[in-house]
Every structure is written in structure tokens, then in C-alpha cells.
Amino acid sequence: MPSQQPTLYLTDDSTEVLLYPYLSELIEEKGEKVSFDRISATDFEGFQSCQSPRMNYGFDERARWFRFSVDNQAIRHKEWFVSLAYSSLDDVSVYIIEEDGRLVFESLGDLLPFTERLIDYRNFIIPLNFNINAKQTVYLRIQTEGSLRVPLKIYRSDALLTSLLPLELGWGIYFGFILVMVLYNLMQYFLKKDKIYVYYTLPALMSTTFLLSVNGLYFQYIFPWSPWLANNIIVFSIAGWVLTAAWFAYSFLKVKNTLIKVLLWIAMGLGILGLLLAVFAPYSIGIRYAAAGTIVNALLVLLSGGISWIKGYRSARFFVLSWFLYLLGAIAFALKSAGVLPDTILTANLLPISMMIEVLFLSFAMADKSSFQMEAIATEKEERLRVQHKVNFMLEDKLNKAEQEVSSYRKQLAEYHEEVSAMEEKFKEQQLLTESVENRSLLLKRNIEEQNRIVNMAKEKEESLMDIALRYDAQSIEMDYNQSIIDSFVLSIPKERISGDLSMMLEKDDDLYILVGDFSGHDLDAAIQKNGVEKRIRVLMDRNILDPGDLLRYLHEEILNTGEKNFQLGILRYTSSMEKIDYASASIPMFVISNNKTYHLKGDPFRVGESDAVFLSHSISLKGKEAAPIVYLYSDGYGNQLGDESNIPFTNQRLRELLFLMHTKNMSQQKESLFQLFKKWMRAGTFEQVDDVLILGVRLKK
């Protein structure tokens, strides 16, 4: 039914008045164009009472006409303002019919440059100037591609400024808070060199950009000359927030779980698609996609954080709480944009409030993560001290045993020297007692033979001492590898009493892991660092960091942060169910023999802890191979050993050829052959050992 709404009477007591009770509305259907002359005719009956007191129509691209009449009964006030408190409206046409019949027309909207507005303010403000007892009729035609909201009020001139101040103060507090958090985390990045602090600031900046743009502040202060940028920055900032938030979650949660990876990659894909729509698609499509994508992204990230929390990642609890609170604000904003919820103070401010809480709780999560890392470092230091005490005790025991053995051999040598001296004295006495040249010659010959026998015995004792020393470390590192499900050997020949080489074999989730490392030095520091790295490897694997390349990269970052010496390390994973080898290496070679076919990987030419190092994973499939494959990992000590009569190194190439020739032997025979050949090569030229030697061989069971 046609409707004639009541006239609004303004008095001196009026300050601000909600216009909904005085409004009539008319909807232009798509394809229909209603002229102002037609609807302003006295006999036009198309206007109806407003159907929605919320004045929120959601995503509706149809044009709407609004009409209201104002009668100024105020004696002291002639200036009044109509406030349309929503900045993202494309076209706002204003028609004011004065009491004497004159028509005033103004064209507003965010499709026009900001400089053409009547009042220099981010929302639309329309001045009404009329005398006492004067009456005006106002028509508004409003159309937009985005969410259509029409929060109309009329203000007295002095009351308008008073109503705007708290709102502007609130936005100032919000943007100041975000700026402080961004600067704080950038400072943390420069102090700790952890990129996660930079990733944290990106979604905070993107969400702030969105609030600046959707509330008209970007259009007013940044892009007043470009309506296209002012509109599309809304979609762009939402899509950018979706992408950067998912990337922050991916980095913060240290994702290794396949399901979490898939969820967060989907979230990042939503953000990339949104960025493309912001540039190439119409605004109406982009803004609808952005509203829906925000909710989906928040759900995906929240689900990823929940899974990580269940998997035992302690810092994820703050992460989940912050995203749950943000999700509430995002849902409220999306429902308000779709017209489901009314445009109230609560729904208008729930999103920025939830964003502030999210930023705050994410800072708690970052602090908790940092605290966890500090606890881990403290635990590691305690463990290093414990290992150091244990190593000192073991070294002291070994030194005592070695001193006892050396003392015993010295005593034997002294006895042999006494025998030689006694023989010399006896020979001199016999020289004096006999005058026979024949007898003196015979005695001299026997004396020389006896001296040679004693000297040879001394040499044999010295060589036996060297063999014992070499074999001691070559066998001590075997530990309980023979109890494993595979056939293997470890040949370890330290240059000095303490070896700087590392070998490990362990099982995780039915996969076999083999590690070989080469640390600088042959002292206590090398032993402590070697034990510390072994501990770190086990801790990383307990946190489900299982890919060899990821293990190397995480270990590399920790070594860079602590400033420890760099070292060489190779990590091999054998998945028997898939018959596949994954290998990542920092300058440690791998040699594989399968069905008389060889595979040789030199490893990446970097050391763990070396600046600008990059480590990659390599895979070898062993499916279809009949014979059990053999894997060798080795340090450079064997290949660099000088020897032979030509004073040349043995070389890794010659070592691989040797391994191929003997690979059909059992593992213990291979170890013995390698050990004997090393002694022969080194003694042929009477050379000293140049470095620690470590070769680890494993025959994998298919």
C-alpha cells in the first residue's frame, strides 16, 4: 500500500534524530529506471514504508529511493546535517525541494573523486539550511555493488562534531595499538633474526589496511584522486590478509602434518585467487568472494591450529584462542555485510575489537614460543654439561688405562735394552778371553743376530701398541648396532684419542635413519658439540621433523643462531615399505650399490652453520631390485690419507672402487679389509694419520 510517512519536526531541543520512522522507500527493479520528475509528482504513489528498521539490505545491486520531509521549528538553529554513516556506497544522488519549490541537487558516492564532496569527511554528510518554520522534502537515490547499508540520521550543527569525536578517538586508539605491536615485532626481528616476527606483522598490516579502506579513511587521506583504488583496495587488503595470515600460520605452527599442510595451502590459494579478483574482476564479484573467503580462511587456520595443539605443540593454544575470537568478529562482519545482522554499534565494532584481541593473543603465542625455545636451550646446556662430565670421566679412565699400557711396554723395552747391554758386555769379555779370530767372528755374528732379534721384538711391541690404539676406537663405536634389524659395520679410526666424527643409526615410525658427521678438531669441544648435535637430532625427530632436508635446515638455523662451529653432516632415511632412500647432506657423500648398479651423491657443497647454505633432499627408488642394497656413508679422512711411496692421497674415487670390489663380502670382512688396507697404505710411506676416519656401511633388508 502507498505510504505517506510523518513529517520530522526539528526544535531547539533536537540534537540528533534517527530518520527511519520518517522514511519512505522505493525499489528500482533491475533494468528499470525511475526519473526524479516522476517520483516527485504529487500524484505518485509508489513509495512504501521502510520494511527493514535495520536499514541494512546486504548485497543488493538494485537502486533504492528514500524520501522524508523536515519542518524546522527551531528558533536558534538554522543549520542541520543529514549523516549517511557508511562510506562504501557507489552512487548517492541527493534531491532537496525547498518550501518555495526550488530544487537543490547534489551527486555523491565513492565513484567520484573525494574532492567533489560537500563536506570533507569520510562518510557522506549533507547540509540542510533553512529558516524557521521552513519545510523541505529530501529524496535520496542510493545504489552500490557492495553491501547496501543506509544508517541515516539528522544532526544539529553543534551536535554533529560532538558525535564524531568519540568515533575518531576510538579509531585512533585502534590504529595506534596496531602500530605499536607492528613496531615491537619488527624490533624483535632485528634483535633475534627470526623471520616469524616479520610474518606476524604482515596480516596485522593487511587487516588494518582493510579497516582503513572500508571506513573511507584511505579514500579521504591516501587516494582521494582515485575512486577505483579506494574501492578495490578493500578486496585487495582482505585477500592479502587471507594469504599472509595463512603463511604466518604455516611458519608459526612449523607444519609437518600432511593434513595441516593441505589446509593451509588451500587457505593461501584462497588469498591468491582473491588478489587476482581484486585486480581483474568487477568489484561486486570480488567483495562477495572476499566476504566468504575470510570465513573459510579463518576456519581452515583455526582447524590447523587445533590439530597442531592436539599433536602436542604447546604454543598453539594461544594461537587457537586468538583465531577463535577473530572468527567470531569475521562471522559477525560477514553477516552484517550480507544484511543478516543489523548495523549496530556492537556489530560495527566487533571485528576491530576481535582483531585487537587476536593481535594481542598472537603476541602471547610468540612470547610462549620464545620461552619454550629458551627452556629447550637451557635443557640442552644442562645436557651438554652432563655429557661433558661423562666424557671427562671416560677420557680420564681411558688415559689411565693407556698410561698403564704404555708404562708396561716401556718397562719391557727397558728390559730388552738391559739384555742388549748385557750381551755387549759379554761380547767384550769374550773378546778379551779368546785370541782366535775365528771365535771372535763367530761371537760377533751371534751377537749381531741377537741384537737384531731384540730390536725386531721391540718393533713388534711398538706395532702391537699402535694396532691396539687403532683398533680400540675402531671397535668401541660399534655399541649395539648389531642388535638392529640390519647388517652393518662402522669403521672409526680416530687421529687422536678423541674422534671428531659422528655416526648414528636409529629407527622412527618404522623408518631407518643413518647419520654420519665430521666435526672440526679432535678435542673435548668437538666431542661436546658432537653429543649436542646428536641430542638436537633426537629432539627434532620427537617433534615430527622427519624429512632429512628439513632436519638439516632446522639444525642449520640453530647453529647459526648459537654461533657454534660449522660441520659436515649427512642424513639418510630408508623407508622399507616404499623401498626408497631419502638423503640430504652437508658435504658428506653417499654411495649406494644395488644389483651391481651404483648411485653416488656428493651432497650439497656447504657445511651446517655456514652462511647462505642451502640443503636439498634427494630420493632414490629401490623398487624392483632383487638383491639387498648396500649403503655407505663416509667422512673425508680415508680419502685424504697420504701414503704409498708417491706421497699421494688415497682419494674418495679409489675408496668407492674398493667398496664396489668388496661389496659381496659380509660386513665384518669388509670392515677388516678396509682397516688392513688403511694401515698398509699409511705405513708404506711411513706417514702419520692426517684426519679422523669414519666409514659406515649398511646392508638394507628389503
Image: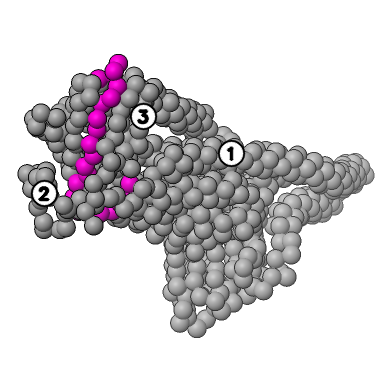
N-term mark: 2 or 1 = 2
The percent position of residue 312, horizontal first and vertical second, equals 64, 55
What residue does disc 3 label? 16
Say which of 252 and 501 sits in front. Answer: 252
Q: Disc 2 vs disc 3: which is toward the camera?
A: 2
Mark yes or no: residue 515 visible: no
Amino acid found under the numbered disc labelled 2? Asp
Q: Secondary structure beneath disc 2?
A: loop
Identified at 53% across, 50% down, the residue is 324
Report if residue 64 lies within the magenta region.
Answer: yes
Residue 407 lies within the magenta run:
no
Q: How crowded is mark 3: few (under 14 residues within 10 Å), some or many (20 or more)?
A: some
Q: Distance between the residues labelled 1 and 3?
A: 43 Å
Quarter of the picture holding the N terminus: bottom left
> Which residue in the protein does label 2 denote?
43
The local secondary structure at tag 3 comes to strand
Point out the tag, 1 or 3, that comes first from the N-terminus: 3
Q: Which dot, 2 or 1, sits closer to the camera?
A: 2
Amino acid at the residue labelled 1: Phe
Q: What stretch is highlighted in magenta?
A: 55-78
- Front-lying residue, 250 or 222: 222
Q: Give the residue at the far top of this rendering.
A: 76
- Sequence-first disc among 2 and 3: 3
Q: Where is residue 349 in the image (x, y as percent from the top left)?
A: 44, 39
Image point 40% across, 48% down: which residue?
342
Dot label at residue 412: none
Residue 281 versus residue 674: which sits nearer the camera? 281
